[in-house]
Amino acid sequence: MMSLVRLFNRFVVSTARLFDFVLFTSVLLLFGHLRFRRQIKSIWPKQPVTLGPKIVLFMHFDKYGNVRPQIVQYIKELAESGRSVVFITNSGKLRSKAKAVLEPICTSIIIRNNVGYDFGAWRDGIAHYNLPQPHTEELIIANDSVFGPLRPINAMLGAIDYNKADMWGLTESWQHRYHLQSYFLAFGKKALNDRAFRKFWAKVRPVPSKRYIVKHYEIGITQYMLKYGLTCAAVWPYDTLISMIDQLQINKLLTFKKNDYRKVDPVSITRKMHLLRVRHAMARRGPLNPSAELWRQLLQSGFPFLKRELLRDNPTKVEDVHDWIHTVQHELGLDPEPTLVELRMMLKGIAP
């Protein structure tokens, strides 16, 4: 009898939680529909501009209206690759110094309210310039959620081949549902001219919920394209990164000699813990976030970035992230200093 009572109580609690979630989501969605979707405050230059056949909509946020030097370098390399860069800031403002740096390298600068997160900004850019235009061959949407580029991005851009896939990301994730991670997405002519592209962006609303945005827009855009028969690919495929973690690496960490200091060294222990964590996920078919858990393998295979969230917050508690400076500087011969400059301004209570 007691077990039936417990089951009933659990059912009531679960139903109540589900109702609360559905009600909360419905309220957020209604709020998103009531808000004005267009949140643009100003556009530079005031006169109309002509965008080239390859376009980048680059989303930015900084509450003070600054633009980090690494982001300027990233945008500069995108522009030097022959792409028209539309810089869209959700900061609601942009300092004059930042404008002076951006204007020579950007085709357009859009300042908008901080509404709708990244997808709200990209949607405003797409709507304002009525993209794609008949001559548009490629559209890239990207954001400033990375440190870097640590190395030139020309090889990364050169790896995007629209003969092999219609839509590209840098990394792909199987968390929740398969999707290309949205900090960098590239659409070729076939994807841009498919009704799926216009239909998706017509549905984007400024919903004030990051969870909703991730589920319906970040994950949703890949799933939407796939359902319409378009093909998707990642420059750094998930299975390739996973395959880099082989049994030999585990053996090196598990076969310490009797008096080997690494058996008690905290740094060595964290390296072993992380490798085992990844191997456990592989054994359980558990999806990992490649831009976090597989950061080392990404860097070793030519990835030019580190995710800001990983070094700033490390929300998934990646055990070996302390190795990033050594990996960047001593293993790869790259310069960690530009990233350290930014971390000095943002870290609280932890070291890099």
Image (tube, rainbow, N blue to C red):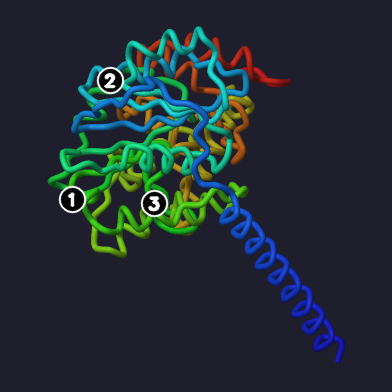
Q: CA distance from mark 1 to mark 2?
A: 23 Å
SS at badge 3: helix
Q: CA distance from mark 2 to mark 3?
A: 25 Å
Q: The residue under label 1 is which amino acid type?
A: Lys
Instruction: Residue at 29%, 42% (x, y): give it.
Output: 131
SS at badge 1: helix
Tell me residue 345's x, y (percent): 63, 14
> Can you identify the residue that label 1 sits on?
190
Can residue 145 be seen by looking at this rendering?
yes
Tell me residue 54's x, y (percent): 22, 32
Residue at the front extreme? 47
In the picture, measured across the screen, residue 310 lies left or right of residue 86, that is: right
Q: The residue under label 2 is which amino acid type?
A: Ala
In the picture, measured across the screen, residue 261 lies left or right of residue 108, that is: right
In the picture, measured across the screen, residue 17 lies left or right of residue 308, that is: right
SS at badge 2: helix
Nearer-the-camera pick, 214 or 296: 214
Tell me residue 202's x, y (percent): 40, 54
Tell me residue 68's x, y (percent): 50, 15
Q: Answer whether labels 3 and 1 touch (C-beta < 8 Å).
A: no
In the picture, measured across the screen, residue 201 lies left or right of residue 345, that is: left
Q: Is residue 113 above or below residue 123?
A: above
> Can you identify the residue that label 2 sits on?
79
Q: Answer whether labels 2 and 3 touch (C-beta < 8 Å).
A: no
Numbered marks: total: 3
Quadrant of the drawing holding the C terminus: top right
